[in-house]
Amino acid sequence: MTNDKCTNKINTIIKAYSEEGAIETAAKILQDGGLVAFPTETVYGLGGNALNPEASAKIYAAKGRPSDNPLIVHIADTSAVYELAEDVSEKAVYLMEAFWPGPLTIIFNKKEVVPYETTGGLSTVAIRMPSHDAALKMIRESGLYIAAPSANLSGRPSPTLAEHVIEDLNGRIDMILDGGPVGIGIESTIVDMSTETPTILRPGYITKNMLENIIGHVEIDKALTCPDPSIRPKAPGMKYTHYAPKGSLAIVEDLNTPLASQAVIDKINNLVREKTAEGFKVAVLTTKDNSEKYKCDNILLLGEKAEGTTVASHLYAKLRECDALGIDFIYSESFNRDELGGAIMNRLLKAAGHCVITV
């Protein structure tokens, strides 16, 4: 594997996960301490042996990821939780039974077997069981627990296609398992079960209401809902800029409605006209509902407003498309901040560096 600067590039193996021998090859690389990018139902992950400090260090180096940003440990059987975690509560068991395999990460107090290099120096460990067939087969074949953040360079939009992984990490990691487009398109929900009150540290497809239907009251980390920068998020990774395109992204929002009002549409059209006149290349992120209302050469459709799953699955790919088109300024509609819309807005706000224009 390369050094922490990744200057001496390696030849990255790229195989379709359904290809004969691909899973076995990936498993052998992981057993030998290497790194494999693989599909999950959320985004592509960059995997290494979670119990090998050197493998975790390679993940941080390949991504350029801050070392205090914990890695999520991926497992293929719930029995693994009891080998990795202390104090597995009854409520945590209910969540595992309800949502695993699936897009939910649960935080527990860790056992000594989990190295601090994997947990970002924390005494807790984040665990999830992905539902993608390739991920489960690879984990089982390797016989390991797999530490895996998203398979992108730190700060870039998360990868929802193998091509996105190739763009960011080709030559920096050992192998990429190509599973085609992922389903959900945004990272898993993270809920902290290591404290007395279950707390959402990162919103995702599994919503607050869904969690509360299983275990009762769940709080949301105040840093996710309060714009005050003095409030530090409980999840260290949430303090960093994520998902950002190369161009300048701003969200245009009408505080009176989560929908794109006429005032939002007029404001975006004015901004497009101004920046275009200045010689910049501009794009608009919108939904099928409003696409014909904008006057811009680059209108990128995220899906349908009423179908949040379509927006989530297209968001990162459209941000990367902006880079491919050489877009200088990007203007996006806002989304309802409840439930899945809240997870979409969380990603958009971080991609925009919390640049919001209100009308």
Image (cartoon, grey):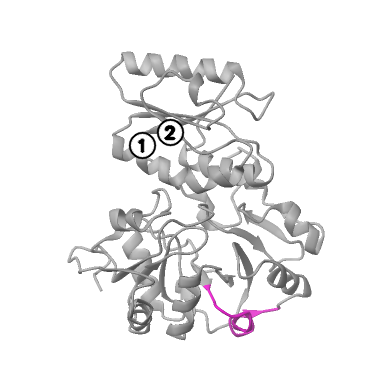
Q: Say which mark, if any, is on residue 322.
A: 1
Q: Is residue 330 visible?
A: yes
Q: CB under 8 Å between callouts 2 and 1?
A: yes
Residue at coordinates 38% horizontally, 49% vertically from top-left?
156
Magenta residues, as a range? 74-87
| Residue 80 counted in the magenta span | yes
Q: Which residue is mark 2?
A: 300
- Residue 228, given in percent of the width and then of the height, sits at 61, 38
> SS of the residue at dot 2?
strand
Q: Quadrant of the C terminus?
A: top right
Is 73 placed left or right of 30 in the picture? right
Q: Is residue 344 magenta?
A: no
Who's the residue at 37% across and 79% down the image?
A: 30
Mark number, residue 150 = none
Badge 1 element: helix
Q: Quadrant of residue 177?
A: bottom left
Q: Position of residue 223 (x, y in %)?
A: 63, 46
Gap between marks 2 and 1 measured at Cα: 9 Å
Instruction: From the top left corner, tell me how far across and down residue 11 is, in percent.
Output: 20, 69
Badge 1: residue crowd in 10 Å (few <14, some 14–19, many ≥20):
many
Tell me if residue 305 comes above or below residue 272 in the rendering. Answer: below
Question: First in sequence: mark 2 or mark 1?
Answer: 2
Measured from the top left, where is residue 229 in percent x and y? Answer: 57, 41
Residue at image location 19% in from the left, 65% down from the top: 9
Q: Is residue 244 visible?
A: no
Placement of 111 over or under 296, stated as above or below: below
Q: Amino acid at mark 1?
A: Cys
